[in-house]
Image: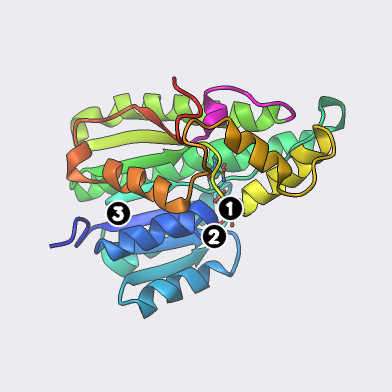
Amino acid sequence: MKRFEEKTVVITGASRGIGAVIAKRFAREGANVIVSANEESVEVVARNISDLGGKAVSFVGDVTDKRSVVELFDTAEKAFGTVDVSVQNAGVITIARIEDMTESEWDRVMAVNTKGVFLCAQEAIARMRKHKRGGRIINTASGQARQGFIYTPHYAASKMGVVGITQSLAKEVATENITVNAFCPGIIETDMWAYNDEVWGKLLGNYAPGELMKEWVQGIPMKRAGSGEDVAGLVTFLASEDAAYITGQTINVDGGLIMS
Ligand SMILES: NC(=O)c1ccc[n+]([C@@H]2O[C@H](COP(=O)([O-])OP(=O)(O)OC[C@H]3O[C@@H](n4cnc5c(N)ncnc54)[C@H](O)[C@@H]3O)[C@@H](O)[C@H]2O)c1
């Protein structure tokens, strides 16, 4: 029997990058997956999973909108009956000098990265309580939840907020067989990192494309960027029975970049 047979997993931010790899990994391990994102291409991820014999349903919605989040979890229950694992992974970043950062950038990053995690976790916990099967809430933070990086005060604040949400909720549901944990990816090769490489690269001194990434990767003890699979290994562990006694934790998955 596969690890997640008869388990239903909701994953936000699953149209690409880290979320899409996590979704495929859960599906390979037998889970029913709901792949969700605010772009239509998330449908392709569901189709890829189905083509390989997995069970997936896609949902297009916005994690900052309570009604949309309720609809996401309604879709999960309608398709598969329960919600056992919810991975709050949707996230956005912008990079700008303090004098250029707009109020709307601040609001958007906080809304997606922090309020979005809260709304999805809130809805997931409500469904898990109703089904009385316990559950796993897993939130995507960032190395910036450990240490703020230059030109991204809003992103650092949003991800440190994720750690606070994780700890608070973990305490609230601890006796209900529901665990709540977060993880901090370091440098993972995705579209988001391609944006980071370009914009940080320009602001930090006109790096050619790929050069900043190369330099920062040299600062990682393992001397390589991470992959979606590196992250999916941790997330599926946190979702598994082996992690039953782990809650309220925030775990780095970054090749040793940050050791705290
Ligand atoms: N790539 C990295 O190096 C890195 C490092 C640390 C943390 N992270 C975090 O990991 C998560 C995934 O990052 P990624 O690199 O795969 O990013 P990505 O840009 O490749 O994908 C982001 C996903 O979030 C979705 N999304 C964005 N806004 C949304 C909204 N309002 N509602 C619903 N979905 C929305 C997008 O559609 C997409 O599916 C994010 O939370 C990010 O902050 C990434």
Upstream in the sequence, badge 1 or badge 2? 2
Tell me if residue 142 is in the magenta stretch.
Answer: yes
Q: Which residue sits at x=52%, y=23%?
A: 146
- 150 or 99, nearer to the observer: 150
Tell me if residue 222 is in the magenta stretch.
Answer: no
Q: Which mark is residue 16?
A: 2
Q: Which residue sits at x=64%, y=33%?
A: 155
* Element class at badge 1: loop
x and y percent of residue 91 in the render? 58, 45
The stretch of residues the image draws in magenta is 141-151
What's the magenta bit mostly, secondary-structure-wise?
A: loop
Q: Amino acid at mark 1?
A: Thr
Residue lying farthest to the left in this orientation:
1
- Report the number of numbered marks: 3
* Element class at badge 3: loop
Q: Which residue sits at x=19%, y=62%?
A: 5
The CB of the residue at mark 1 lies under 8 Å from ligand 1: yes
x and y percent of residue 255 in the render? 45, 35
x and y percent of residue 229 in the render? 41, 52
Can see residue 40? yes
Tell me, yes or no, whether the two marked residues, 1 and 2, touch with CB atoms within 8 Å: yes
- In the picture, measured across the screen, residue 184 lies left or right of residue 147, that is left
Which residue is tagged 1?
Answer: 190
- Give the position of the N terminus as an image quadrant: bottom left
Which residue is tagged 3?
Answer: 83
Real-space Cα distance between discs 1 and 2?
8 Å
* Element class at badge 2: loop
Real-space Cα distance between discs 1 and 3?
27 Å
Splitting the image into 4 quarters, where does residue 182 fall?
A: top left
Upstream in the sequence, badge 1 or badge 3? 3
